[in-house]
Image (cartoon, rainbow, N blue to C red):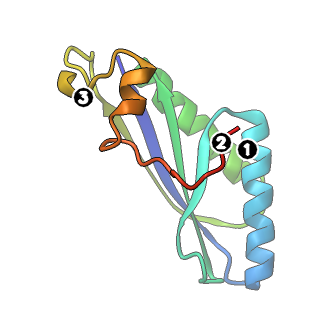
Amino acid sequence: MLVVAVARIVFDASAFTLKEKRRIKRSLVDRTRRKFIVSIAEIEDNDNPSLLTLGLSYVSNSSSHAASAIDHVLSYMESLYLAPLIYKEREILDFGTLNDPLWDEVDDFSTWEAVKNDRNTIPFDDNKPKR
């Protein structure tokens, strides 16, 4: 079963310059990644010094585990008190069991030689020096 938990959080960075906002973001992201295995990126308002909007994602095999993990991450980030948290939302995407392949079997190559020989699917740089 594939479960993905996603969250969007917005911090109020209105008292900071763009340089200070980026320092706050770097600190939030680095501290959180040291403590949790979660993907984090600034997703909106990149050049707006008054808002810091981050997106988080976490992959699991259980809906309750994914929700709990994202909630712990959000609580941790809020407890750092680097900037006031003004908005948070999360969603759990449950993909269930994967009965069908993600790609067409026609495109499934059985060997690396077949992939190399089919130049229509993968762009190769013929000008690149060979080793």
| Figure check: 89 above or below 47 | above
Residue 83, above or below 104 = below
Q: Quadrant of residue 2?
A: top left
Q: Nearer the viewer, residue 126 or 111?
A: 126
Q: CA distance from mark 1 to mark 2?
A: 42 Å
Q: Residue at x 42, y 22 (%)?
A: 113
Q: Amino acid at mark 3?
A: Asp
Amino acid type at mark 1? Thr
Pointer 1 or 2: first along the chain:
1
Question: What residue is shown with label 1?
Answer: 32
Name the amino acid type tagged 2. Answer: Lys
Neighbor class of circle 3 (other Cα within 10 Å; few <14, some 14-19, many 20+) is few
Q: Residue at x 20, y 21 (%)?
A: 105
The residues bearing labels 1 and 3 have C-alpha atoms spaced at a distance of 39 Å
Q: Which residue has dot 2 on it?
A: 130
Q: Residue at x 73, y 44 (%)?
A: 32
Name the disc covering residue 107, or none.
3
Residue 112 image offset from top left, x and y in percent:
44, 21
Name which of mark 1 and mark 3 comes first in the sequence. Answer: 1
**SS of the residue at dot 1?**
helix
